[in-house]
């Protein structure tokens, strides 16, 4: 766990809101998302329900765990649905134990909890960036091969 104090960006932190924290991964910086719980952890801080790659599945655990890999402060991304907080939390808790997958990640989970279309704009951006890199690499290989250069 982290021994550094958790930092928060000023904003409204209401039960059921979507929280995010920047983390560094193998694909670069991403924004890890979760749902602010109505429960308090043993450390006295609010708990968070999130689809955590670190845990391997959807969990409800301490803000300290949510912040473990943070490279910046926690922020509230607001409350994007018209559902009541107890409904958002109930929907989120039905997912506890569900495995983390790239194509079913923390963004998909947060959208599901709020009964929004399950999508991941961040995943789409990262895939597009990766596609551009692969295209550039293949273009360079084709160019070198057409010039008679040795393959890489």
Image: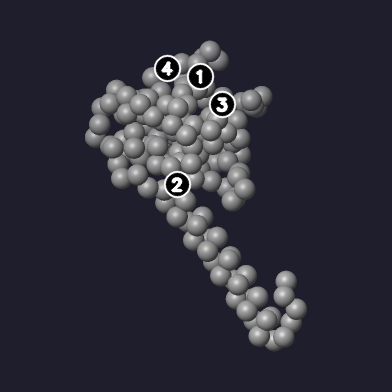
Q: CA distance from mark 4 to mark 3?
A: 14 Å
Q: Are marks 2 and 3 in contact (CB under 8 Å)?
A: no
Q: Position of residue 99 (x, y in %)?
A: 47, 34
Label annotation for residue 128? none
Q: Which residue is mark 4?
A: 39
User: Residue drawn at (60%, 50%), measured in percent from left and top?
Assistant: 28
Q: Position of residue 57 (x, y in %)?
A: 49, 32
Q: CA distance from mark 1 to mark 4?
A: 9 Å
Q: Which residue is mark 2?
A: 103
Q: Position of residue 106 (x, y in %)?
A: 45, 39
Name the front one of labels 2 and 3.
2
Q: Which residue is mark 3?
A: 65
Name the front one of labels 1 and 2.
2
Q: CA distance from mark 2 to mark 3?
A: 22 Å
Q: Is residue 141 left or right of residue 125?
A: right
Q: Quadrant of the C terminus?
A: bottom right
Q: Which residue is mark 1?
A: 45
Q: Earlier in the sequence, mark 4 or mark 3?
A: 4
Q: Earlier in the sequence, mark 2 or mark 3?
A: 3
Give the structural element (helix, strand or loop) at label 1. Answer: loop
In the rendered image, which quarter is residue 151 located in?
Answer: bottom right
């Amino acid at each position: 766990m982290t021994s550094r104090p958790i930092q928060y960006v000023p904003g409204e932190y209401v039960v059921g809101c979507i929280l995010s924290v920047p983390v560094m991964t193998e694909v670069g910086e991403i924004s890890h998302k979760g749902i602010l719980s109505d429960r308090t952890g043993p450390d006295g801080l609010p708990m968070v329900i999130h689809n955590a790659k670190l845990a391997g599945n959807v969990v409800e655990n301490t803000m300290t765990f949510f912040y473990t890999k943070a490279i910046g402060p926690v922020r509230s991304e607001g409350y994007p649905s018209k559902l009541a907080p107890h409904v958002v939390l109930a929907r989120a808790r039905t997912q506890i134990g569900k495995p983390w997958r790239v194509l079913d990640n923390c963004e998909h989970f947060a959208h599901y909890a709020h009964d929004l279309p399950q999508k991941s704009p961040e995943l789409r951006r990262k895939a597009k960036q990766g596609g551009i890199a692969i295209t550039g690499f293949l273009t360079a290989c084709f160019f070198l091969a057409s010039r008679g250069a040795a393959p890489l």
